[in-house]
Image: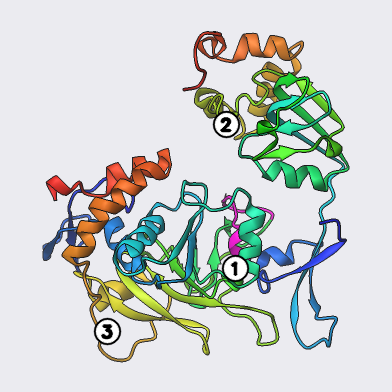
Amino acid sequence: MGVPYVPIIGLVGTDLLKRRDDMVVAADPFGGKTLSVVAKALRPDVAVFHAQKADREGNVSCGYDIEALILSEASRHVIVSAEQIVDRLTEKEATGAFIPGIHVDAVVHARFGAHPGGCTGLYGPDKVHMARYIAAAQDDAAFDEYLKTYVRDVKDHDEYVERFVPREWREPVRAVGA
Amino acid sequence: MARAGACGRRLARQGSGASPTGHESRVTELNYNESELLAVLLSREVRDGEVSACGAHSQIPAAGLLLAQELHAPKADLIILNTAFTPFRTSKAFHFLCQRGELGLFFVSGVQIDRHGNYNLHQLGTDPDRPKVRFPGGYGGGLIYYAARRTVVFRTEHTRRSLVEKVDFISAAGSTPPDVIRLGHPTKLVTPKASFRFEKDEGVLRLDTIHSPWTLADIQENTGFDLGVSGPVPATKAPSAEELTALRGVVREKMLVASPAYAAWARSTLVEPQSA
């Protein structure tokens, strides 16, 4: 939207409002008789997300995930990793959840870049890994161990895919995650 | 007793005086389970020609919406977020539809619900920095509760821990001062044991009807707030054969294609027509 704040209907009287300093109850500026919550705009410095396909101009096709479009409009910088990078997205691909390159700073080729999450139409979430993640997230020591195994001790994304994406997903002849 | 959402062909319910230790009591055989009962009761709240919605992962109200469309509200517009029954690709489109006042009815649930129609989807424990349990929250609901013309709150558990005098954390408030812009209010609370109506002027929930086979004493024993009743409370109209047939037939079929999670729920919860 690009405006610094917006009035919204809702949230008055909630404990959520008490916990936030970016939302306040304010009077109607046109007459001042009614009240509503006014929320400050969120303006992230950087948005990073994963998509199905991107092209050299930074145009992105991300399935049905149009929330990513809102995110890229709001953020100052946008970095997109994609399963596949092509010279130019076709007319057909530039529909649905399409993010024009004008919002995008960089695209990065990363096959299985959403793992252990899923990438709609290509593969689902890795449930075994997700269960491991949830268990690790229960305390700081376990989570540090998780980060060491899956992040710090991994040289690069290729090594990550080789070691942690299920082998059967990587077989080129099969539909993955089906 | 089977939890709503759990598998259950038929539910034998123990009425007042029942306890896990096995006191003698009456047992009533009902030809529907708790999830089916809730879906039927929610469906009766849907009005023809209105836009009615429920959130993601909301199998019971989704079944209620589809049932209403099948029986008495053929021209209702339904929004079941994150399924095939969603007209929008973004939360933004749904958000602004609600803010414009175009949503007639919303179904919502909370971990705790209190006498004043406040619900809690955030945390247990009153210290915000050290909650005993933290839940995903419910940011959307905190807006929709004020913007939808009517909201019907439902809860699959009717106990003193879920229906409380005061919620630990207010995710959405039942009432607001008159000068606050608000387009709608909660109108009802439906549980597996009873229905409550929200008295807007007083800002409180009052016991409205009791579902078979429960008694007023059962409701009093299992509710953490004053029921606000002085005389006899009528019985809830039980699900009719027509409602149950549609729910287990057409609605079940529609849920099988709504999304994999809804299909799994429909298979395990809605009694198959042949075995009914």
Q: Residue B95: give x, y in percent of width and height.
A: 64, 61
Q: Residue at x 41, y 38 (%)?
A: B260
Q: Who is closer to the viewer here, B1 or A71? A: A71
Chain part drawn in magenta: B129-143
Quote the CA–CA distance across marks 2 and 3: 51 Å
Compared with residue B233, is residue B268 higher up or lower down, i.e. above or below? above
Q: Residue A158: give x, y in percent of width and height.
A: 71, 10
Q: Is residue A117 among what the camera can see?
A: yes
Q: Nearer the viewer, mark 2 or mark 3?
A: 2
Callout 1 secondary element:
loop
Q: Indicate the amino acid at tag 2.
A: Thr
In the picture of the structure, the residue carrying the numbered disc 1 is: B172
Callout 2 secondary element:
loop
The chain identifier of the residue carrying mark 2 reads A
The chain identifier of the residue carrying mark 3 reads B
The chain identifier of the residue carrying mark 1 reads B
Q: Is residue B96 left or right of residue A135?
A: right
Compared with residue B76, is residue B62 higher up or lower down, i.e. above or below? above
Q: Is residue A86 left or right of residue B91?
A: right
Q: Residue at x 34, y 65 (%)?
A: B68
Q: Nearer the viewer, mark 2 or mark 1?
A: 2
Whichever of callouts 3 and 1 sits on the residue coming sooner in the sequence is 1
Which image quarter: residue B94? Answer: bottom right
In the picture of the structure, the residue carrying the numbered disc 2 is: A120
In the picture of the structure, the residue carrying the numbered disc 3 is: B233
Is B141 covered by the magenta stretch? yes
